[in-house]
Amino acid sequence: MKRLIVALALAFAPATAAFAQDAHGDNAEVVSVPADDAVLAQAPGNVSLTFEHAVVLTRVEVHAVGEVVVPISFTAATAASTTYSIPLPALASGAYEVHWNATGDGHAMEGTLHFTVQ
Ligand SMILES: [Cu+2]
């Protein structure tokens, strides 16, 4: 939970917007569905990530509360793409974190998004 609070604090830091154009390594260059911090009435069937530039998505992990790993069938991409859709298993109510790593355009990127299933 401590990490979640830190992540939220960073997400709302005033400096975030100023760095958005060159922010490689945070959520600034990715649009996700569910959106970060979304509260959902129904569990999503997948997570989609759309990047500003083509990337090779190398790692995706989904965690429930308490760092419990949610098994997903993700295999690292073999070619760069701007969009990815990662199928999710049936998720119970609760809070989830999605951690991702990618490389592209000559740099490494990572990010975490959070969502809650009611
Ligand atoms: Cu980038």
Image: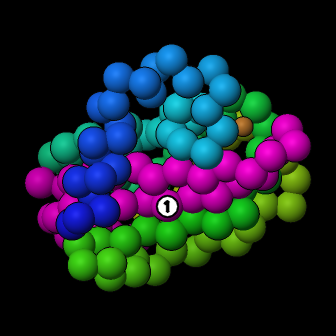
Give the image location of residue 36, x and y in percent: 36, 41
Q: Residue furthest front?
A: 15
Q: Position of residue 111 (x, y in %)?
A: 53, 50
* Position of 12 relative to 42 (above/below): above
Decide if residue 26 is in sight here.
yes
The magenta segment is 89-118
Query: Is residue 39 shown left or right of residue 52?
Result: left
- Give the percent coordinates (x, y) of residue 7: 34, 50
Which residue is at the front of the view, 15 or 67? 15
Ligand 1 resides in the quarter of the picture at top right
Quarter of the image with the N terminus is bottom left
Which residue in the structure is indicated by mark 1?
99
Q: Viewer-proximal residue, 93 or 109?
A: 109
Above or below 18: residue 54: below
Residue 83, relative to residue 21: is it above or below?
A: below
Residue 107 appears at what percent x and percent y?
Answer: 80, 46
Q: Amino acid at mark 1?
A: His
Q: Residue at x 58, y 74 (%)?
A: 73
The verdict on residue 98 being magenta is yes
Dot 1 falls on a residue whose secondary structure is strand
On screen, residue 64 above or below 51? below
